Image: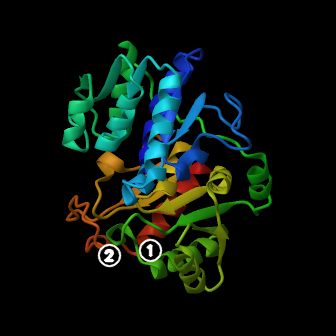
Amino acid sequence: MGDVLHSMPAVTALRQAHPDWVIGWAIEPQWRGLFCANGCEPRTPSMPLVDQVHVVPAKQWARSPLKPATLRDIRRVRRELRAMRYDIAVDMQGAVRSAMVARWARTSNVIGEAKPREFAAKWLFDQKVVTQGIHVIEQSVEVANAIFGESLPMTLPLLPCDPAAEAKAAELQQPFVLLSPGAGWGAKRWPADRYGVVAKQIAEAGFGVVINSGPAEEHLAHEIAESSGGAARVLSLGLAELIAVTRRASLAIAGDTGPLHLACALGKPVVGIYGPTDPARNGPFHCPNRVLRHPESVRDHSRRSEPEAGLLTITPEAVTDAALELLREAR
């Protein structure tokens, strides 16, 4: 989710600069909702950014690469991409599998970073872009600039609007703060009981508190609600609902995770609680923010289950102070 959101500002800038272009995006099925809602009619509020969404279940393919169903689905994607007759393919992720999907489109030019996330991906690019930016959003914009040799502006991305989800979110009592306690792996996950303390302190300051309970995160959300003494409300949110609720939040608090980047994409104030990942590269961008990170935390993407040591030095009081400071500034 974070990878997609980090690429969306660049594609939004392309869309605004070239409204007549046909733009497609190849995406894992679980993130399709970042592009389309309510039927996915092209170029509507339900699908504002791209003209075509190509569903590519690459992770599912990796689990059963030799099954006939996998091979049929790969052929389907290749036919679909080639039928669109795209002129250019751009790999924003820098992975071998994303670069391979770009090549399947049989375009005249496949563009990617000169130093992609996975080194081997560079050999699949026709045009390799040397990027100067530190943040991944800056790097994505530089790659997009190479398409037409222009200088695209930094901009907030266009996200879809699902009327049913928006109507449901509108029922939430304002103002409220959104907590998203999950993370891609344990080393990035700040303890749930500390989120509970923050929820209680924010509620005492006069704000409602909503906990985003994502897939397989229900235990975290309910532990926070219990630790808060009932001050926080748990919501099980699909992607459309998460977008709608985040639009109405006064502030979001999370670690380096998709919901934090979604809040930034919507221009919301955020408090980022960081440990083993580098906020200079993956932190809040283009939104009011406070990032809390211990100076001795080092960049480490090892999938460890326990919270990183530096992450545990961040106190609930520090998070609450940062949140209330941003809320006062927003007012």
Name the residue that disc number 2 marks.
305
For residue 82, above or below residue 312: above
For residue 97, above or below residue 146: below
> Which x, y percent locates residue 111?
32, 25
Nearer to us in this view, 86 or 309: 86
At label 1, counting other C-alpha atoms closer than 10 Å, the crowd grade (few under 14, some 14-19, many 20 or more) is few
Q: Earlier in the sequence, mark 2 or mark 1?
A: 2
Q: Is residue 25 left or right of residue 242?
A: left
Tag 2: residue type?
Ser
Q: How is the image coloured?
A: rainbow
For residue 264, above or below residue 46: below
Nearer to us in this view, 21 or 105: 105
Tag 1: residue type?
Glu
Q: Residue drawn 42% across and 53% down?
A: 61
Name the residue that disc number 1 marks.
317
Q: Quadrant of residue 174?
A: bottom right
Q: Residue drawn 64% across and 59% down?
A: 238
> Which x, y percent locates residue 300?
22, 61
Q: Is residue 279 left or right of residue 258?
A: left
Q: Residue drawn 26% across and 60% down?
A: 301
